[in-house]
Amino acid sequence: MSIAPFNLERFYARYEFEVPYIMCSSDPESFSIEELLSFESGSIDEFKKQWLGYTETKGNPKLRSEITKLYKDIKEENIIVHAGAEEVIFVFMNSMINPDDHVIVHFPNYQSLEEIARFKGAEITRWETKEENDWELDTEFLKKAIKKNTRCIIINFPHNPTGYLPSKEKLNEIIEIARKHNIYIFSDEVYRFLEYDNNDRLPAICDLYENGVSVGVMSKAFALPGLRIGWVATRNKEVLEKMAMFKDYTTICSSAPSEYLAIIGLKNKEKILKRNLGIISENLNKLNEFFNRHKSLFNWKKPKAGTIAFPSIKKEINIEDFCLDLINKKGLMLLPGTKYDFGTKNFRIGFGRKNLPLCLNKLEEYLVTSSSSISKIRF
Ligand SMILES: Cc1ncc(COP(=O)(O)O)c(C=O)c1O
């Protein structure tokens, strides 16, 4: 069995560095090394002195110490640093999921959260959500979906692509179901800390559940994807041991300069988060106005967290054709929901970048001046 192409990543690989206006990014506006180092006095000289030998396979202890501050009951020994969240997903699925296992996964989803378990031979049940139900997860479905061999429930809050964030009560319900059946919860929390209201922030699964596995990364909330620094945090020793063993076959250890820069990023997380949430808030105001002007064309609901949402088009048109026409005519990229294997109407929009107003103008121009050559629809 060969692994299926990662559709979203293939779409990005084709267009991201060719198209001038990208309006579907999930990572917020990033920083230069110079800007990042300016947050910490003395760090330029310190950065130059960083040793370029191998680092600890579990991750630089100072970095792990900064990471523990994102959690309540997590210690340095509960963390393993990886090359981005993507490596955490790959290593967890490879070390913990077996061919006889059954896995339940939040859907739509960032494809690797489902695909690697399938590639390992596990049986997959998609825990489907719908736009008309505000992407709400139904725990009655979850209870019925559990089988004798269910090994893991895979969730992602705040969610890619819908922006869905459940209540604390809903999260506790999911944990109780998992606990009753002794099932792991693998929780992708890469957009955590980007809640628009701090009261909506969920505790991390590794703090709430003894068999909970949390994924964090510098790429999203902290806007530093080029560092390729992510981590797993869990109190489950078996998971940590198995993942550490598997990681010896992937990256062994992280990039030393990246670990140093990640420490600076985390030490200054309040400044970074404030700046990111400021950009997001301004962009969301613009998006609300835009979608109000185009109510007849799009279904839109502002999410509670994160940098992305998954609105849909009301017209009789395949969203992939719409997105490709938009790229061709305006050099503007939106991500069609077809890349999530999710119908032909939804598309991912990203609002963490400073150029959103410019991108939105391009979209507006397209809607006002174009009639779609592919469908003969006048927008
Ligand atoms: C939900 C989710 N998990 C994991 C990743 C992978 O993150 P990274 O690129 O930092 O490895 C992404 C990236 O878009 C994501 O959206």
Image (tube, rainbow, N blue to C red):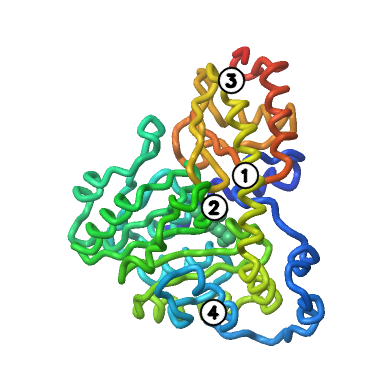
- At x 25%, y 49%, the residue is 142
- At x 77%, y 81%, the residue is 46
The secondary structure type at the circle numbered 2 is: loop
Quarter of the displayed picture in which ligand 1 can be seen? bottom right
**Which is closer to the viewer, label 1 or label 3?**
1
Tag 1 and tag 3, C-beta contact below 8 Å: no
How many angstroms separate mark 1 from mark 4 (CA)? 29 Å
Query: In the figure, residue 150 lies in which quadrant?
Result: bottom left
Query: Exactly how many numbered labels are in the figure?
Result: 4
How many angstroms separate mark 4 from mark 2 (CA)? 21 Å
**Which is closer to the viewer, label 2 or label 3?**
2
Residue labelled with disc 2? 194
Question: Type of residue at label 2?
Answer: Leu
Residue labelled with disc 1? 280
Query: In the figure, residue 146 lies in which quadrant?
Result: bottom left
The secondary structure type at the circle numbered 3 is: loop
How many angstroms separate mark 3 from mark 4 (CA)? 48 Å
Residue labelled with disc 3? 294
Q: As drawn, is 238 to the left or to the right of 281?
A: left
Query: Could you tell which of marks 2 and 3 lies nearer the N-terminus?
Result: 2
**Which is closer to the viewer, label 3 or label 4?**
4
x%, y% of residue 78? 43, 78
Query: Could you tell which of marks 2 and 1 lies nearer the N-terminus?
Result: 2
Question: Type of residue at label 3?
Answer: His
x%, y% of residue 66? 56, 75
- At x 71%, y 35%, the residue is 357
- Front residue of this view, candidates 71 and 122: 71
